Image: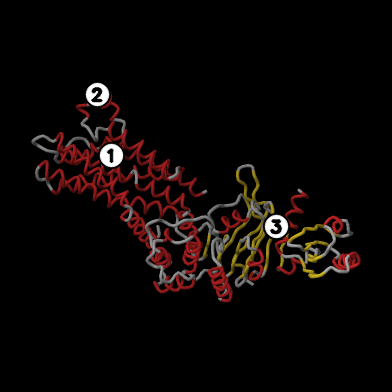
Amino acid sequence: MNWRIFRYEVRDEILTIVREPAALFFTVVMPVAFFALFAAMFGGEGGFGMTSLATYGAFGTLSVVLMNPGIGLADARERGWLRVKRADGIPLRVTLSAKVTAALPYAIVTLAGIALVANLTGGPLDPIQTLRVVGILVLGATPFALFSLAVGARFSPNAASAVLNAVLIPSVVLSGLWFPLEIMPGWMGRLAAWMPPYHLSRLAVAQVEGGPVWVHIGFLLATAIVGAVVAALAYRSAEA
Amino acid sequence: MEHVLEVRSLVHRYGERIVLAGVDLTVDAGECVALLGPNGAGKTTVVRNVIGLIKGDSGLVRAAGGDPRNPEVRSRMGVVQQSVGFPRSLTVWEIVGGAAARRGRPAEAARRAIAEVGLTGLEDRRAAKLSGGQQQRLQLAMGLVGDPVLLVLDEPTEGLDVEARRRFWDTMRQRLRDGAGVLITTHLVEEAASVADRVVVLDRGRVVAEGTPDELRRLLPDRRIEIRTGLSADVIRALDSVHSVEERGGRMLITTNDSEQVVRTLFELDPEATDLTVATASLEEVLVALTHHEEVAA
């Protein structure tokens, strides 16, 4: 990895996200606003506390990490900007790594917004626990970025957005990230055990409530391996 | 003389279709080579192989001292490609300054490149808001910041106005004097011929002719006669050695491979004929003849 090139690639990616208000709205404002709405509707007296940060935070993180890199890659491909960068001597893997890296600060901003609402509605959050949950969510969401890149390497920006939303929304609902699985039909809980977002949220919840972590880590590692294979195949087609 | 670009026996297929069927091409330091040919001849495929975006099925490509598939080698080249756009969010300065910084060049190199392509004053403008011609120049500026040893330019004057084209060719002449090699494709054949040291004509994936612009012009023995005469096009067309006749603005445009005989006959038939001019074939006509001949032969 050429770190000098990587640094400037990350800078360009961050500027691109900051200067696109629409992208910020969907990936930062909307998840936080939804969380505030759910907290007001279902929070009760206890409000939405640390556990909700872990589950709903998984959705917020995935909405950034799954959407931004793929749509950004599809846009760069369609414009021909990706060809310009490659001809300018920027290795494709550096460009792709920068897209994923640049999404992470936005995931942290989204989580900070959700944590703020949780703090206001569910009482003061333990700062160490909060940092652990945020760290787990950001790190654990990285394999999903590989799927995002694979979609971005194959589809137009509009199609990539549609495909990624079609993956994101059902998978977070089926994983119990919007509504607790306890209030959903039984089959949904059984299905959730096979959904990668479920394991991301359970790993984060384990930082708060304790419980097994290795099964979730194993599932996320398997997701990373499958994501890496899919992204490598898509990478080859983008290189061709 | 050192080759800054060497292409040997390059074959490239898209599926079953052979797009390049063994192309040989060299560019020396300080030399400008124009790669010409009709649409679909394979020019852009050659360019994409040369800048390392794709790899041929067989053959050798060495550019700027190495394999262009290596990004470090590519950073020693300056490239202008067709049909590219810039991101909505980045400014001219961020793009060219970033290209300089990635190569470890000072900001001054970016400022010089921006000035060289005539974009000074537009540094804070979002790149996507530039006109098509300005975006072409911005792409060129990205390539110039590294003082490239090889410039590969695919239709670089597309969308440029007269003044911008003049500035572009001035920049190329200066870079050639500084020792860079230039490979250029363009549909503005005569404009390229005024700068190119050599012309390579590509048709259906093969090099069908190569030489200096004058050498290529001599390949076509036809002369073009223009004359104002009362004779009809049919009468002129029936004369020996006349290949084509076209009436335009009250004048007859005649192509022939025996201009002396045809002119003599024209004045015998119409002593009142006026406004006579006889010219050699243009490079564009040579190009059409060469590629048309290949189509007939194929």
Q: CA distance from mark 3 to mark 2?
A: 69 Å
Q: Residue B92 sits in which quadrant?
A: bottom left
Q: What amino acid type is highlighted by mark number 2?
A: Pro
Judge by depth and name the residue closer to the eye, B33 or B65: B33
User: For the view shown, which residue lies furthest in the top direction?
Assistant: A186
Please indicate, yes or no, whether residue A232 appears anywhere in the rendered image: no
Pinpoint the chain carrying mark 1. A
Judging by the rendered image, the residue that carries numbered circle 3 is B207
Q: What amino acid type is highlighted by mark number 1?
A: Ile
Judging by the rendered image, the residue that carries numbered circle 1 is A217
Secondary structure type for disc 1: helix
Nearer-N-terminus badge (1/2): 2
Residue B214 image point, x, y percent: 73, 69
Residue B129 image point, x, y percent: 42, 59
Judging by the rendered image, the residue that carries numbered circle 2 is A185
Q: Residue at x 38, y 39 (%)?
A: A162
Q: Residue B213 sits in which quadrant?
A: bottom right
Q: Residues within 10 Å of mark 1 (few under 14, many from 20)?
A: some
Labels 3 & 2 near each other (Cβ < 8 A)? no
User: For the view shown, which residue lies furthest in the right direction?
Assistant: B268
Q: Residue at x 69, y 54 (%)?
A: B203
